[in-house]
Image (spheres, grey):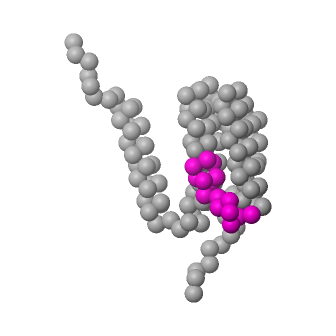
Amino acid sequence: MYASSYPSAPAVRALRGNLYQQVGVESRLAGATPHHLVAMLFDGFVDNVNQARGAIRAGRVDLKGMAIGRAVRIVEEGLRAGLNMRAGGTLARDLNDLYGYLTLRLTQANLRNDEAALEECYQLIQPLREAWMSIAETPQP
């Protein structure tokens, strides 16, 4: 007679999984160096682009939109916002332009269900990601 206000078992499992994932991310953030934080942004970008690809293939428009939205936020609020345009010179300007282009292509991929645009974004970020990962943080004396 009365509708249950309790979430369904699958909803509880999904919520639990999201909470565990959030705690894991927060734990990694708490002890992360600035170098590691940028590495996490690159990893998150790649993960979300891959999730968006899978969602397009599965016909899951809702998941595709969420994954692309997270990828855009990573680019705009993480990578692009972290640029020092005054001190960074040509490199910062070039990265700023690249990040703007990535945001445009991600938006187009979302609007058009365009896996090729997602692949292009992946191919553009991967060399930066690899270069960043190759930079070893050296302990300061």
Give the answer, above or below, for where 50 lies relative to 3.
Answer: below
Residue 26 percent location from the top left of the image: 43, 56
Residue 66 percent location from the top left of the image: 55, 35
The residue under the point 58% across, 38% down is 69
The residue under the point 58% across, 32% down is 65
The residue under the point 71% across, 52% down is 96
Q: Quadrant of the N terminus?
A: top left
Q: Which residues are magenta?
A: 75-89
63 or 103, which lies in front? 103
120 or 93, which lies in front? 93
Give the answer, above or below, for where 105 lies relative to 85.
Answer: above
How many marks can you see?
0
Q: Quadrant of the C terminus?
A: bottom right
Q: Quadrant of residue 15?
A: top left
Furthest residue toward front: 86
The residue under the point 35% across, 35% down is 12
- Would residue 131 be visible to someone looking at this image? no
Residue 71 percent location from the top left of the image: 61, 43
Residue 139 percent location from the top left of the image: 58, 80
Asked if the magenta segment contains residue 78, the reply would be yes
Give the answer, above or below, for where 21 lies relative to 106.
Answer: below
Compared across the picture, whether 40 is left or right of 11 comes to right
Q: Quadrant of residue 140?
A: bottom right
17 or 124, which lies in front? 124
Furthest residue toward bottom: 141
Compared across the picture, whether 135 is left or right of 16 comes to right
- Would residue 46 be visible to someone looking at this image? yes
Asked if the magenta segment contains residue 121, the reply would be no
Furthest residue toward top: 1
